[in-house]
Amino acid sequence: MKKNPFGKEGDFITSPLISNLFGEMLAIWCVAFWEHIGKPRKILLVELGPGDGSLCKDLLKTFGQFKNFYNSLEINLLEISDKLKTIQRVKINNRKVKWIKKIKEINCGPVIFLANEFFDALPIKQIYKKKKLFFEKYIALSNDDKKIRFLHKKASNSLIKHMRDLKLISNGNTIEYPLAAIKFLGAISKKINKFD
């Protein structure tokens, strides 16, 4: 990554970059949830893929208005990009915030997960069914004229099993299968259940 991908000069804009109302509403929901579960002494907030840190900054500003909640709060930001971590550290500048690279690093709870556009950014597999056979759609760049073309390769046995078990696709149709998102959701579910 050569530049900051966020904002008007970047590749995309997300809600926290337009207005801090989004973060304020989420913060108030987090406080209400904390109250609903009995105001535990410690609560962990995990933001998945925190972008440039704008959402976390807005959350912290609002959390500061709820002192008891703020004192109970720990925050983990799941981020794998060192460049984005640097941008986030500068923007957030708060000792309550720690960075993690994997869900398995979460070791306390109860826990609230926030994922603004995180799952949208994860890769998907496109599965096509033709004559009861499953194919995975790929995009390839031809060597000679550098044009993009689509390839269909027979899907792996494990992917075929998932498709048959789910019964989501009929002949002649294509579906998007978010394998990476499903794995993340499984890991998140385990953490929520562990600290419930």
Image (cartoon, rainbow, N blue to C red):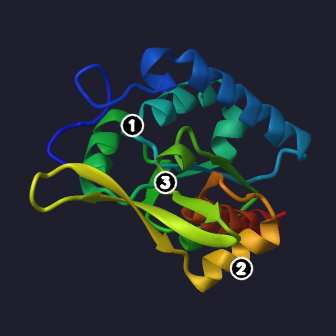
The local secondary structure at tag 3 comes to loop
Quarter of the image with the C terminus in it: bottom right
The amino acid on which the numbered mark 1 sits, given as a three-letter code, is Ile
Query: Tag 2: Cα neighbours inside 10 Å, few (<14), some, or many (≥20)?
Result: few
Q: Marks 3 and 2, how far apart in space?
A: 22 Å
Q: Amino acid at mark 3?
A: Leu
Query: In the rendered view, would you say 192 is above or below 57?
Result: below
Q: Amino acid at mark 2?
A: Lys
Q: Is residue 161 left or right of residue 7?
A: right
Residue at the farthest bottom position: 157
Q: Is residue 102 left or right of residue 28?
A: left
Q: How far is mark 2 from mark 1, CA to CA?
A: 44 Å
Q: Earlier in the sequence, mark 2 or mark 1?
A: 1
Q: Is residue 35 above or below residue 174?
A: above
Q: Nearer the viewer, mark 2 or mark 1?
A: 2
Kindly identify which residue carries mark 3. 122
Viewer can see residue 131: yes
Q: Residue furthest left?
A: 144
